[in-house]
Image (cartoon, rainbow, N blue to C red):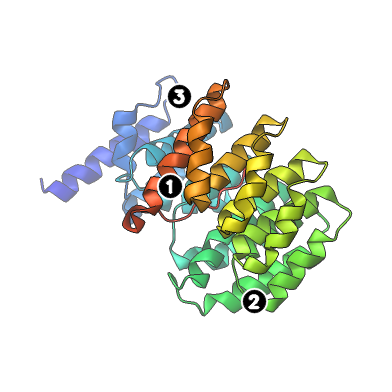
Amino acid sequence: MTADAERLSITGQIITGLADEEKPLANKQLVELTDIKAEDLVFFDRVWKQLSPKRQLNLINRLIELAEDSAELNFDAIFRHRLYDPEEEIRCKAIEGLWENEDSTLIEPLIRIMQNDPSPKVRSDAAMALGRFAMLAEHKKINPDYMPLLCKTLLETYNYSDDIDIKRRALESVSPLSLPRVEQAILEAYKSDDIKLKASAIFAMGRNCNPNWINCLISELSSPLAELRYEAAGACGELGEEAAVPYLIEVADDDDTDVRIAAIVAIGKIGGDEAQGYLEMCLKDESEAIREAAQQALDDIDVMKDPGSIPWFDLRRAE
């Protein structure tokens, strides 16, 4: 038996075993589903339909966890096939599983899902997932010809969606594109009476990387609303303007712990002597969470001193 035939046999046996719901899912077997072949994927799809919803959810969660723990594992073919699963939660999980996939062939499927999926949650997740492709296109890490398509579809979703979460995610995702239409949409959302939409606009200012937003962000650092102070701190960190450091230091003494940590993280991203001196003081804070955040921020400053070690961005957004 050839090595390929042996592997096919092993994979087939593992897929068959998934249907026995009395047996727990074992990592040793699941890792064999990495880089699954087309013929095995067809068989996997048939077995998948026989599984209970609970088993399906458990299985896709385990695959996501395994892929996060090991960069060598790739279950993207399985996740792609689950983008159109009948179950809403599975479709959301499929989008989550594809989070680090930078293949531009995912753009059009995600756009269709954002526009047409019956679930607002799935459409919102798809809109958020498109943000990494906007960032990739902006930085020419994929064909920049995708920029007009991404700009058009995301702005249309922002402008015409009645669901505030979909609207917000579309705005956040289009924000990396340095286009006047995008900046106008961010400004419009910033002036909104809807606090959640305004929070997304502040987040988007950071992703837009236009230094002209810095005055708005510094102003929002003193907002009476913790949610807006939190977003403003994060956005200041993304812009990297040293002018924001003194204001962030003030916010780092906020009554809200989340806001304090966001400010400390931002200070670490900006760096500089003033930032480093303040963070070293934070290492003596009575709060363990603040000490840990300060140490991580100092580590970030060290990373900035070695540009070759800076990792690629992560656009995942907390709910």
Residue 289 shows in this picture? yes
Labels 1, 3: front one: 1
Residue 126 shows in this picture? no
Q: What residue is shown with label 3?
A: 21
Labels 2, 3: front one: 2
Q: Disc 2 or 3, which lies upstream in sequence?
A: 3
In the picture, measured across the screen, residue 6 lies left or right of residue 167, that is: left
Image quadrant where one finds the N terminus: top left
- Residue at image x 47%, y 55%? 313
Q: Secondary structure at mark 1?
A: helix
Question: Which mark, residue 301?
Answer: 1
Q: Nearer the viewer, residue 133 or 278?
A: 278
- Residue at image x 45%, y 24%? 21
Q: Callout 2: few (<14), some (14-19), or many (20+) C-alpha neighbours within 10 Å?
A: some
Tell me, yes or no, whether the two marked residues, 2 and 3, touch with CB atoms within 8 Å: no
Q: Nearer the viewer, residue 217 or 169?
A: 217
In the picture, measured across the screen, residue 26 lies left or right of residue 89, that is: left
Q: Disc 1 or 3, which lies upstream in sequence?
A: 3
- Residue at image x 68%, y 40%? 251
Q: Secondary structure at mark 2?
A: loop
Q: Where, by quadrant of the figure, is residue 63 drawn?
A: top left
Q: What residue is shown with label 2?
A: 179
Instruction: Name the residue type under label 3.
Output: Glu
Q: Callout 3: few (<14), some (14-19), or many (20+) C-alpha neighbours within 10 Å?
A: few
Q: Where, by quadrant of the figure, is residue 148 drawn?
A: bottom right
Q: Secondary structure at mark 3?
A: loop
Instruction: Name the residue type under label 1.
Output: Ile
Distance from the alpha carbon under mark 2 to that under mark 3? 52 Å
Instruction: Name the residue type under label 2.
Output: Leu
Q: Callout 1: few (<14), some (14-19), or many (20+) C-alpha neighbours within 10 Å?
A: some
Indicate the position of residue 17 as horizontal and vertical percent values.
36, 30
In the picture, measured across the screen, residue 310 lies left or right of residue 150, that is: left
